[in-house]
Image (tube, grey):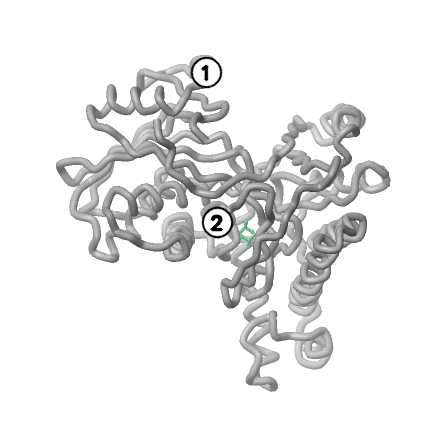
Amino acid sequence: MSCLRLLTLPFPLPIKHKPKPMTITAKQLKEQFISLFNQEPIIVTSPGRVNIIGEHTDYNDGFVLPAAIDKAAYIAVSIRNDQEIHLVAQDLNESFEGSVTDLHPAADVSWPNYILGSIAQFAKLGLVSQGFNAILTSDVPMGAGLSSSAAVECATVFALNELLHSNLDRLTLVKMAQKAEHEYAGVMCGIMDQFASMMGKKDHVIKLDCRSLEYEYVPFKLEGIKVLLLNTNVKHSLASSEYNTRRSECNQAVEWVQAFQPAVHSLRDVTEAMLDEYVLPKSALIDMRSRFVVQEIDRLVNGCKDLQNGDIRSLGKKMFATHEGLSNMYAVSCKELDWLVSHVKNNDNVIGARMMGGGFGGCTINLVKEEAITSLVESIKNEYEKEMGLPLSYYVASIEEGTQIINA
Ligand code: GLA
């Protein structure tokens, strides 16, 4: 990849009113960085992700099936001669200043935290003595469940690893990016998003065992079928608090089972029979939450077999079942997501559909026959907008490579 796609880079900064976005190349980003900071940057891109099936399974030691997509964050970074941090968010027309001697999450603005949290991981290893300049831009829609934050974290840790000559491997960088999210965004996320962004491979999904971190690339080039993302345009604002609550509910179930079955360490080790015996009598709610996860881990393993056997219809059915579970048992959907899934469910051109990511808004992922995409969107757009009072946007995602340096 040698040029940035559809970047919106208004310059010079600061700008009071957002100018019309323009598309620029990596070369232009580099030139603009040089004119702003008078230094040569390194430019790194890291993609957003989709997940075919296996939701809320990563922090329960289960499997996930994500892939990197053609929407990505781009960061241009250089090392400063002092200890200051100067960050610019192009798309927001905002800048931020801090210092590597006083690293902490920013209080009233969120975007710098993904970069600061990433710098903090290198600082903890004693690898940071000077400050950084950075310009960030991204075409991963924010709050759409496509992991815009993981994309920024992965781009940042990768860039710092290069600039500081730290020689850390990709898996270590994935874990550092995840820690940045935990410590600077306050979301106790699993490893899926950062793993997918960093390790993505063109035209493949990643079957990742979140316990052992062993992974396998499974080809995902389906003849005549595309990945269509329908964005509810509901920002998942509830997501971080409810996400952390779901984690604790799962941990509670594990604790109750573990009291009788010491070999159990996570919901990955739990069966539905164990839930019947040890969890249901104590709490119907915790039982329902953990039962979803136990079923979802199983669904993914079988869905992966479907994919390998070329039985895409069977995989699609499982995606619909995942949505039912996420909505009714795990309670992380919302009326807009449910609306979108129910309105494509009986359409024969839609192989499978479900809400995707943490929940409470963002996108549904749909596997749709290519020739039917336009008519499908046309058939639901007006009704969605009228009934939900929100715009409906859509993207056809292609599956791309993970984090990489761009030579400008
Ligand atoms: C968010 C988290 C991931 C994962 C998904 C749900 O995207 O960042 O770690 O838990 O939710 O599958």
* Image position, residue 310 (x, y; %): 76, 51
Q: Amino acid at mark 1?
A: Met
* Image position, residue 25 (x, y; %): 41, 21
* Image position, residue 67 (x, y; %): 57, 46
Q: Quadrant of residue 56?
A: bottom right
| Residue 97 versus residue 52 in the image, above or below | above
Secondary structure state at the residue bearing disc 1: loop
- Seen at 61% across and 75% down, the residue is 269
* Image position, residue 141 (x, y; %): 53, 33
Q: Which of 260/173 is in front? A: 173
- Seen at 67% across and 80% down, the residue is 278
Secondary structure state at the residue bearing disc 2: helix
Cα distance in 3D space between marks 1 and 2: 29 Å
Q: Under 8 Å from ligand 1: the CB of mark 2?
A: no
Please count the marks in the image: 2
Q: Which of 61/144 is in front? A: 61
Is residue 94 visible to the viewer in this orientation of the structure? yes
Work out which residue is located at the far left of the displayed protein and give it.
Answer: 82
- Seen at 45% across and 47% down, the residue is 198
Q: Which residue is mark 2?
A: 199
Which circle marks residue 22 in the picture?
Answer: 1
Q: Quadrant of residue 376?
A: top right
Q: Is residue 81 left or right of residue 253?
A: left
Query: Looking at the rendering, in which quadrant would you find the C terminus?
Result: top left
